[in-house]
Image (cartoon, rainbow, N blue to C red):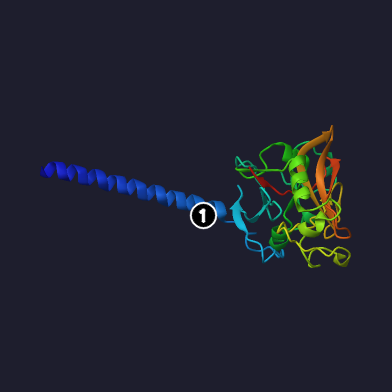
């Protein structure tokens, strides 16, 4: 009897040790996945009356999320430097190299190295990175054209949807007195500008990729500007550098 009790005690003790080690490894993994120098540094003005949740990406970035209608959106611009299986996305800073790319890449707005700026505006990606299907965190995806249209239709008419989608004030949006935004939706659209051979419209234009191809060499995106109230669907060359917002699967 004594030997049986001792045997079962050793088994229980071993199981407890293994369980404890697994929990420790899981916690270490979680901590490694959430350490990022840009976290907590955004200066975006979120809607204090809206309830936000959070999610993280494959690079350890933490983002606010918001439910709008039947969709759950990121309320911040994507800033990952990795695809969701862990491989690195090439960083391309050169103005001569960016417009001739035919594969996925990212850059920082204005080639900034400021964590605060990156945290606020996110990074710019070409459509080749979007089209890999691996840019968004697991459980999320880059919205299709139809999903952007669904958001805009739920918010308002195209001509005025930008009012409820854009961040309020003039901290980041220039010439903001022309478009009195409310950010009623909590989406908090920010003007990360764009890139082709050089950087354009930082502070005056927010351009967000869709995952939908228009025709060869061209894909759909959504645009909002500081001097207008609209959120309009347009198209651009795949090599253009735009911001990305992800929507939950």
Q: What residue does disc 1 label?
A: 31
Q: Tell me if 34 is positioned left or right of 28 in this view.
A: right
Rendered residue at 69%/55% (across/down):
75
Crowd band around label 1 with a 10 angstrom C-alpha radius: few (<14), some (14–19), many (20+): few
- Lateral position of residue 91 relative to residue 33, left or right: right
- Comparing 78 with 220, the one in front is 220
Vertical position of residue 199 compared to residue 4: above or below: below
Residue closest to the eye, 53 or 91: 53
The residue depicted at 63 percent of the width and 41 percent of the height is 87
Above or below, 128 relative to 80: above
Residue 123 appears in the figure? yes
Q: Quadrant of the C terminus?
A: top right
Nearest to the observer: residue 154 or residue 246: 154
* In-image side of 22 versus 204 (left or right): left
The foreground one among 163 and 214 is 163
Residue 120 point in image, percent of width and height: 72, 60
| Residue at the extreme left | 1
Residue 151 percent location from the top left of the image: 74, 48
- Which residue is painted at 70% across and 63% down in the image? 116
Res. 93 in view: no
User: Which of the 4 image quarters holds residue 163?
Assistant: bottom right
Label 1 residue SS = helix
Quadrant of the snapshot with the N terminus: top left
Asked where in the image residue 160 lies, by quadrant, the reply is bottom right
Residue 162 percent coordinates (x, y): 81, 56
Q: At 25% across and 43% down in the image, what residue appears?
A: 11
Count of numbered labels shown in the rendering = 1
């Amino acid at each position: 009897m004594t030997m049986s009790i001792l045997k079962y005690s050793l088994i229980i003790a071993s199981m407890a040790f293994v369980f404890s080690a697994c929990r420790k490894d899981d916690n270490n993994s979680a901590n490694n996945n959430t350490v990022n120098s840009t976290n907590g540094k955004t200066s975006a003005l979120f809607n204090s009356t809206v309830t936000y949740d959070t999610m993280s990406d494959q690079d350890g970035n933490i983002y606010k999320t918001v439910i709008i209608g039947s969709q759950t959106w990121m309320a911040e611009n994507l800033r990952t430097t990795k695809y969701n299986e862990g491989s690195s996305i090439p960083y391309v800073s050169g103005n001569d190299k960016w417009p001739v790319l035919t594969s996925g890449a990212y850059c920082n707005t204005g080639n900034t190295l400021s964590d605060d700026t990156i945290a606020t505006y996110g990074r710019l990606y070409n459509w080749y990175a979007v089209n890999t299907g691996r840019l968004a965190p697991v459980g999320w995806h880059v919205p299709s054209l139809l999903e952007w249209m669904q958001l805009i239709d739920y918010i308002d008419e195209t001509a005025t949807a930008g009012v409820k989608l854009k961040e309020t004030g003039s901290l980041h949006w220039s010439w903001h007195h022309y478009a009195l935004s409310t950010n009623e939706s909590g989406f908090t659209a920010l003007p990360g500008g764009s890139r082709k051979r050089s950087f354009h419209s930082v502070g005056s234009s927010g351009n967000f990729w869709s995952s939908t191809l228009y025709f060869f060499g061209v894909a759909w995106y959504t645009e909002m500007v500081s001097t207008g109230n609209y959120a309009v669907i347009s198209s651009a060359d795949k090599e253009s550098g735009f911001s990305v917002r992800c929507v939950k699967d």
